[in-house]
Image (spheres, grey):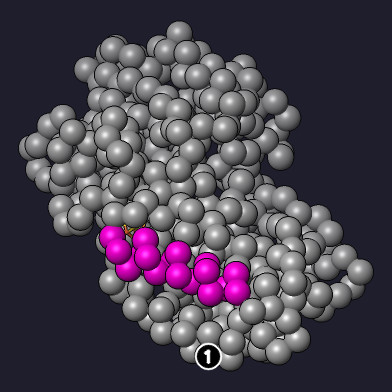
Amino acid sequence: MEEHIVLRDLDIPNIDDIDVYLENGGYETLKRVLADMSPADVTQVVSDSGLRGRGGAGFPTGRKWMFLPQGVYPRYLVVNAAEGEPGTFKDRQIMERNPHQLIEGVILTCYAIEARVAYIYMRGEYLEALSKLQMAIDTARELGFLGDNIHGTDFSCQIYLHREGGAYICGEETALLNSLEGFLGQPRVKPPFPAIQGLYQKPTIINNVETLTNVAPIVERGAEWFRGFGTDRSPGTKVYALSGHVRRPGNYELPMDITLRELIYDYGGGVPGDHQIKGVIPGGVSAPVLTQEHLDITLDFNALQEAGSMLGSGAVMVFDETTDMAWAAHRMMRFFSQESCGKCSPCREGTYMLVNIMTDVMRGTGRTSDIPLLDAIADQILGNTLCPLGDAAAGGPTQSTLNHFRADYEALIRDGKVTIRG
Ligand SMILES: Cc1cc2nc3c(=O)[nH]c(=O)nc-3n(C[C@H](O)[C@H](O)[C@H](O)COP(=O)(O)O)c2cc1C
Ligand code: SF4
């Protein structure tokens, strides 16, 4: 990949500086759109490009925008910058190093969906990203790209930053809306979907940071250009956040037809000590674990789903052959149990039971019958929860490790362990 679409900071030093951004064509797309394109034209280009949401579910972005009900105002745009999925750190780099491209994408999206106000819901710990974005918003306003009657048109747009309080569940779009409104951050029942009834019960589009950072380049260079990267069903590039047992962890923006093996070995430098790979999580801890056999799969939405996992946020975590995957599953389940919001009982009680049983296994007090018990509890959670967190906990760390690495559980039960590592 020679050129980056969203991680342009890798090609252009200091692109977070407004002067550098302007020298490199910054805000030209916005000016052209305001002069020549209707909101429907912008939505059509994004729809034709095949851009799919980069926050987890991979929903087609243009199609989501088209769900907005005709003639209902005000409408809102909410930018999901919560980035709480363990292993995910891509939105942070975008916000810290290429903030203006996100802001331009937000303004273009507001224009396309006929919203006048956007809220950026920010992970609370991202202090540098927060100050960079606030600076970018202030500068854009000073230069007349934000505010009332932008560039003499009748289009007005405001962007507000909201710093969140640190709950993983507030990345889920409806919990996020509750939190933004000042209520307890717990998911809402869907339908109605946010596009119909979202923030303050008004039509609302929620998109991820990376998704919106793709908008200005797509509108500038066209849908066909974007479709030149990746696969038919997953066009474009994706920022993969690579971590775990790799020599060069970090964010890699690559076309979505790259394979897991190419990402890990060609870009990540392979596994330290030249160990074999035992497991790989391709999309944050919510995604089921894959194995050595899956290394030639392309890292796109469909291929990963067909392999029994998901692309999720694109956080690729590598576990080498020295890793006890039952131990890793226990660590991940502790996270899910703590972050369960408690609204529905299969998730609240089920994740708690799974952790307790896994803790017994780690302590050497587990029984052979614990393995089918873990599986049965996970089955009771799957499909019975209000939001995807419960399913993620049951299908991800629990069942995928039981399926692929049962021997690790059996060894702990058979040989016994006294301490919980980490
Ligand atoms: C438990 C949970 C946590 C989530 N966390 C995030 C997050 O931190 N950032 C994000 O963009 N999407 C997150 N999502 C997905 C959002 O609900 C939503 O699908 C996404 O923001 C839509 O934007 P997109 O269409 O641009 O991907 C999460 C979903 C769940 C169930
Ligand atoms: S699945 Fe878990 S996190 Fe989601 S609403 Fe139910 S209790 Fe809350």
Type of residue at label 1?
Answer: Ser
Residue tagged 1: 369
Q: Which residues are magenta?
A: 344-360
Residue at x-position 69% and y-position 78%: 364
Q: Tell me where residue 142 appears, x and y as whole percent.
A: 45, 8
On screen, residue 166 above or below 141: below
**Quick one: quadrant of the N terminus?**
bottom right
From this viewpoint, is residue 319 visible?
yes
Which part of the image, by quadrant, shows the C terminus? bottom right
Please name the residue shown 46% across and 47% down the image: 168
Q: Is residue 159 left or right of residue 244?
A: left
* Side (left or right) of 156 relative to 347: left
Q: Residue at x 74, y 76 (%)?
A: 417
Q: What residue sits 59% from the left and 38% below the top? A: 92
Q: What is the x, y in percent for residue 262? A: 73, 69
Picture layout, residue 365 above or below residue 13: below
**Badge 1 element:** loop
Residue 281: quarter of image? bottom right
Residue 46: give x, y in percent of width and height: 36, 49
